[in-house]
Amino acid sequence: MEATASFLRNKYWVLRHGKSIPNERGLIVSSMENGTNPEYELASEGVNQAQLAGELFQKELKENNIPLENVRICYSPFSRTAHTAKVVASVLNIPFEGAQCKVIEDLKERYFGPTFELMSHDKYTEIWDLDEKDPFMRPEGGECVNDVVSRLVRAMTTMESQFRGCTILVVSHGDPLQILQTILNAAKKHTGSSSDLESIIQAVRIPSILSQHRKCALLTGELRALI
């Protein structure tokens, strides 16, 4: 397990939700209204993936002598991420309704805009091509990479202010998690004078870094030690 970065109080792991019903149907479901709809939770294969991810996380915790009381699960409010977090909490025997599990709205899926909502997931490549050219350019009515960074900074600030010395599992979506990894990997390498999280991320919030987020892509149900 990686050491905590000096500008963070906690250790972080990320987990992309298991295979969802939208994944099975090949649909983009990115708005809050659709994303929180119970019909778009995990497919049965995704439940299995979440179970396996929970078992792998449990193994890592034991190997690193991390007590369960130090674990927190922070998750997006979308039904597929809440479902994933609930399965993992069950594997770890942590009460999902208890203080160790927290829904954070800023961890929600990237909103790709009305042009893409409920369309074929083949259209993701159009957005990612745009991201590579200019991560500050929004798809029509949707969020650009930089917009997602803004709320991920808020999510990190929330977790850092509420928890100290914890191991936090962040359960979110493909784009937000690859963007989160991109900014935190860059932040770890940043050698500026500040130890303030927001200042460090502001310094690495540049097109040449943000445009590369696809290099940190996760498969559905994939668990990864972050920082």
Image (cartoon, grey):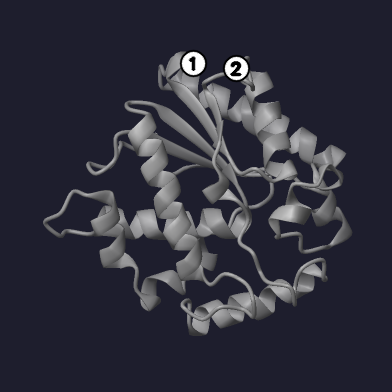
Is the Cβ of the residue at disc 2 closer than 8 Å to that at disc 1? yes
Rendered view: 53 above or below 112: above
Q: Residue furthest bottom?
A: 133
Depth check, front residue: 53 or 198 = 198
First in sequence: mark 2 vs mark 1: 1
Instruction: Sort mark 1 into few (<14), some (14-19) or many (20+) by Cα contacts within 10 Å.
Output: some
- Say which quadrant the C terminus sits in: top left
In the displayed structure image, the side of residue 209 where residue 134 appears, left or right: right
Rendered view: 171 above or below 51: below
Q: Which residue is mark 1?
A: 68
Give the quadrant of residue 190: bottom left
Rendered view: 155 above or below 185: above
Q: Which residue is mark 2?
A: 94
In the displayed structure image, the side of residue 208 where residue 54 appears, left or right: right
Q: As shown in the figure, which amino acid type bears the numbered disc 2?
A: Ile
Is residue 227 visible to the viewer in this orientation of the structure?
no
Q: Residue at x 46, y 74 (%)?
A: 211
Q: Residue at x 78, y 41 (%)?
A: 46
Q: Residue at x 41, y 50 (%)?
A: 154
In the displayed structure image, the side of residue 204 where residue 138 appears, left or right: right
